Image (tube, helix red, strand yellow):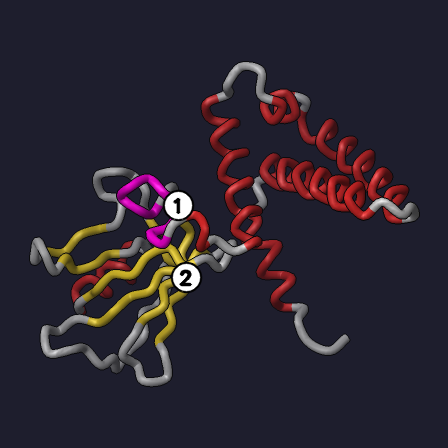
Amino acid sequence: MSATMPRDLKYDASGLIPVVVQDVTSGDLLMVGYANDEALRRAEETGYAHFWSRSRRKLWKKGETSGNVLRVREARTDCDRDVILLIAEPAGPTCHTGMRTCFGEDSATDAGVLAEIERVIADRAKRRPEGSYTVRLLDGGLDRSLEKIGEEATELVLAAKGDDSERVIEEAADLLFHLEVALAQRGVALSRVLQELKKRRGPR
């Protein structure tokens, strides 16, 4: 189901409104563009981000040539209703330079690393490069990944009982990686897990 675009927006004198795009999984800012009423209507109809090119003076779908589309999951507006926030799932690098965001890799949040790992796992599953540990793990099936999760969880527990903080960090990273592989094997997007955590925010 496509996201519903906000109504009663305040466009500028050219009939445009700024659009900020945010990664649904990591929260990273991916790009800023401009949209007119038609672009927003197309985004709502298709579920993919559309913009108005001020230089080419034409409507365009993000990723129409590269395949790096932005699937819109949610659309919001600010309090003045003159800026739109699109929360989207990127199919690949958002920037035309090949970088994940138009603001450079240094702009990525820590959570963005988890989103990047998810994309790498999907890439390994598709391209299956020789010698890849991820490919071997995927070939072992879900049971192998679950076994590794159990092993890494045990190692994390043992490390946490010791006095070496660096080992705790390393074991926690191993556990998160193997958890992401298992999620991929089950077809569960990382964003779904993060959304569940967001729902649980608040006093407990």
| Corner quadrant of residue 138 | top right
Residue at horizontal 33 percent and vertical 39 percent from the top: 98
Q: Is residue 71 above or below residue 138?
A: below
Residue at horizontal 66 percent and vertical 39 percent from the top: 177
Looking at the rendered structure, the kind of residue marked 1 is Arg
Type of secondary structure dominating the magenta stretch = loop
Residue at horizontal 17 percent and vertical 67 percent from the top: 36
Residue 95: image x %, image y %? 31, 47
Check residue 99 for magenta coloring: yes
Residue at horizontal 25 percent and vertical 69 percent from the top: 18
Counting other residues with Cα less than 10 Å from the Cα at mark 2, is it few (<14), some (14-19), or many (20 or more)? many
List the residue tagged with mark 1. Answer: 100
Query: Given this view, does label 2 or label 1 mark the residue nearer the observer?
Result: 1
List the residue tagged with mark 2. Answer: 87
Secondary structure of the residue carrying numbered label 2: strand
Residue 161: image x %, image y %? 92, 48
Q: Give the distance between the C-alpha atoms of the residues marked 2 and 1, in whole angstroms.
A: 15 Å
For the question of whether residue 83 can be seen, the reply is yes
Q: Which residues are magenta?
A: 94-103
